[in-house]
Image (cartoon, grey):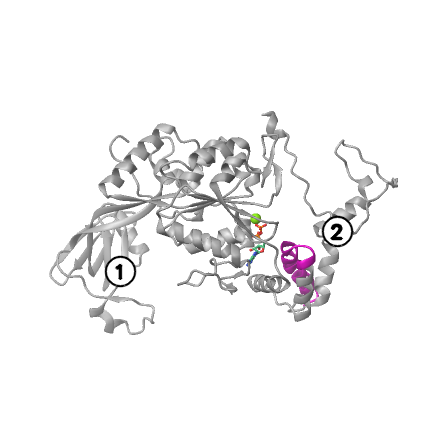
Amino acid sequence: MSTTIATTATTTTKTSDLPSLSLIAAHSHISGLGLDETTLLPKESHQGMVGQLQARKAMGVILKMVQAGKIAGRGVLVAGPPSTGKTAIAMGLAQSLGPEVPFTALAASEVFSLELSKTESLTQAFRKSIGVRIREETEMIEGEVVEIQIDRSITGGHKQGKLTIKTTDMETIYELGQKMIEGLTKEKVLAGDVISIDKASGKISKLGKSFTRARDYDAMGPETKFVQCPEGELQKRKEVVHTVSLHEIDVINSRQQGFLALFSGDTGEIRQEVRDQINTKVAEWKEEGKAEIVPGVLFIDEVHMLDIECFSFINRALEDDFAPIVIMATNRGYSRTRGTNYKSPHGLPMDLLDRSIIIHTSSYSADEIRTILSIRAQEEEVELTGDALALLTKIGQETSLRYASNLISVSQQIAMKKRNASVELQDIKRAYMLFLDSDRSVQYLQENSSQYIDDSGNVTFGSEVKTEQPPAEQPAVEQPPVEDDKMETD
Ligand SMILES: Nc1ncnc2c1ncn2[C@@H]1O[C@H](COP(=O)(O)OP(=O)(O)O)[C@@H](O)[C@H]1O
Ligand SMILES: [Mg+2]
């Protein structure tokens, strides 16, 4: 890898390599930020997004910044109580960005669970979020297929053939090898198709059917695209633009891994020399006008799970030449930063907070909860009666939106058992009784604490130990701060 740096592999820089499938399912009803296309102001209910107008409007501004592609290396913190749509809004942003801008989502705990060092996995996440738009000239053959002739050998294994292809000015016959024949078969190329063949990679794309053959195909249906037979030379130089992420370039050029690692996702540690070389090369391309940097978005969910080493890494990485916009989400208030003994707002160290702009999300009104729940029901293809939706809304208000949303599929199961097509009030009630929300679970725990194993490993079976119980109506939902002393010992 001394002079040439490979960049052609997959061009899918979007969330394709997300391991967090559940994340997508919970937000599958969301197809964007739900903004008005011209003013970029949020609509009350659009693209699956409901309410939370202030935060969505703020995220719309971030969207504009990212799309302008001029600003990188900023931190945005989305802070708010659980179940107020922090992750949903980030997913909405991802959908609104379009396919060209890289978006990487990372749950903070993944940094610890991979077989990579914390800094390596953060580095990879950062570099996945930087796109490089590369302009290259390639030789193309473009024309209308006159005839494809494929000869099979008697044994059936080896194939060879001829492709006759023309423009309005010329016609040529090309010999076909095994690979090209497979390519043509895969694309279902027939006589009359206008195709282009990338000479370097052999990639075949179908551009449409030739107008001259339009009459032969009147049974083809409206989706058939007709194009003019190309003019002039068959071979053309064409400029192609493709966007790859820095991480993809790293992987392709890292000798131990090679591009196959992109598909398995098992990329291992990448040596710093490889990255340095690539940074230099990309900077050169940028100078020469061959490439543009597309700063994307790195979304770190549950960011309070990171520790002080990660935070200081992020602080430093935001100052890099190639830095994405980092969006973080947290539901923590004033709490301890992991790996330290001091407390700070949102559990983030002050220097990182100082660099970040903060977006707040707040609790939903009953109307908003009702709309979100009915969108969720539609998404899960569950029919709710009016009563059922009203009760579910009430549950959502009193417990959490997420709990109410989880009851939808559960109560559908209950309804199906009775062979009912739609979920009724009774089914929601059943589901509510069967599955506890966190409030009631806490209450249950307090009442039955003696039967559970406690922190010191003690358990008293059978004999109910009467203890002074705190009043039951005390809602104890406040999550206790995560105790993570483990972090400090290593
Ligand atoms: N404004 C909203 N519009 C539509 N759906 C929402 C909205 N806010 C939250 N949801 C949905 O409610 C559930 C919980 O929201 P989530 O974003 O996971 O909360 P958080 O990340 O703040 O804890 C998800 O299924 C999410 O898609
Ligand atoms: Mg979340």
**Location of ligand 1 given as a quarter of the image:** bottom right
Tell me how far mark 2 sits from mark 1, CA to CA: 61 Å
* Residue 209 horizontal/vertical position (percent): 25, 65
Along the line of sight, the residue nearer the viewer: 135 or 41: 41
Span of residues in magenta: 396-419
Quarter of the image where one finds residue 269: top left
Residue denoted by label 1: 207
Q: For residue 408: magenta?
A: yes
Position of 208 relative to 95 (above/below): below
Q: Which residue is mark 2?
A: 440
Apparent side of residue 393 relative to residue 109 in the rendered image (left or right)? right
Taken as a whole, is the magenta stretch helix, strand or loop? helix
**Is residue 154 in view from this perspective?**
no
Q: Is residue 457 left or right of residue 267?
A: right
Q: Amino acid at mark 2?
A: Arg
Does label 2 or label 1 sit earlier along the sequence? 1
